[in-house]
Image (cartoon, helix red, strand yellow):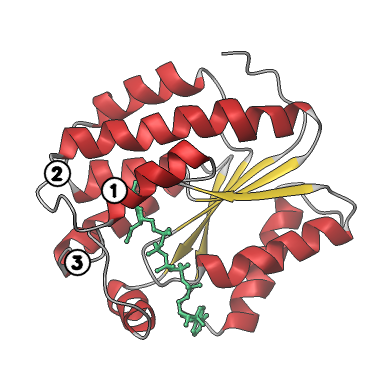
Amino acid sequence: MNNEKHGKFITLEGIEGVGKTSNLNFIQGLLEASGRDCVVTREPGGTSLGEALRGLLLSHSDDNMSADAELLMMFAARAEHLAKVICPALAENRTVLCDRFTEATYAYQGGGRLLDVKKISDLETWVQGDLRPDLTIILDAPVEIGRARAGKRSAPDRIEKEKDDFFQRVREAYIELANNHPDRICLIDASKTLPEVQQQIREKLVDYGVLGL
Ligand code: Z5A
């Protein structure tokens, strides 16, 4: 893969219900006001093949899907997303704002499903080469807060139906990722009110050089 990139690649992560969707438009607004041309996308998804895979991954049509099949489908969707959307946009100097990316695989398939992290890092290298997000914002909140917020909406999908201990491991894996890569991954306290969360996000975008002061 040709990983020559010019635009900024920003990803938003966290357990369900922490506020990724609520904050995506806010971040897009800040970036566009600063003159960046944004592409907003999501994983799994972002292409017609990726959205079809998302449907298979999240629906209850195959509740007993093996963890390896789930992992490979996440990366199949990602390979298509990189080839058709992310890499072309970065090459055109656009800013890509993506709702979840590979850190979700480390958190959910590694932390949640307890898959060998080496399988994930091998696929990451194969599919992405040396491309990594310039900044990953992890919205962090206790599992009970995320689940209570998410629970106010629709019926749980195939992954959302997992138990609290699964999401506790997902949360811990996200915290570990932030601790291991402070140069490109930051944690936000998403248990606060929405305006307080957005203030923290604004500060991090400045700290990481995405926004001017
Ligand atoms: N997945 C995976 O396993 N491996 C991978 O590699 C990838 C993904 C890429 C995709 O779901 C699923 O795929 C996900 C991980 C897995 N499964 N799970 N769980 P998704 O990302 O599309 O959906 P989600 O994680 O389930 O997100 P969500 O439930 O839509 O949550 P959210 O976007 O973070 O939350 P929200 O919709 O913005 O907010 C939820 C509610 O809380 C809403 O009513 C808001 O008004 C409210 N809210 C938000 N912020 C606040 C604050 N600060 N205070 C009070 N209330 C708030």
Rendered residue at 62%/63% (across/down): 24
Q: How far apart are marks 1 and 3 (CA)?
A: 13 Å
Does mark 2 have its CB less than 8 Å from ligand 1? no
Rendered residue at 81%/33% (across/down): 93
Give the x, y percent position of residue 39: 71, 47
For label 2, count other residues whose C-alpha is less than 10 Å away and answer few (under 14), some (14-19) or many (20+).
few
Query: Would you identify the image quadrant in which residue 191 lies?
Result: bottom left
Mark closer to the chain start, 1 or 3: 1
| Disc 3 to disc 2: CB gap under 8 Å | no
Mark closer to the chain start, 1 or 2: 1
For label 3, count other residues whose C-alpha is less than 10 Å away and answer few (under 14), some (14-19) or many (20+).
few
Q: Distance between the residues labelled 1 and 2?
A: 8 Å
In the depicted structure, whether residue 3 falls above or below residue 106: above
| Foreground tag (1 vs 3) | 1
Residue annotated with mark 2: 65
In the rendered structure, the answer to whether residue 35 lies left or right of residue 147 reads right
In the rendered structure, the answer to whether residue 115 lies left or right of residue 144 reads left
Residue annotated with mark 1: 57
As shown in the figure, which amino acid type bears the numbered disc 3?
Lys
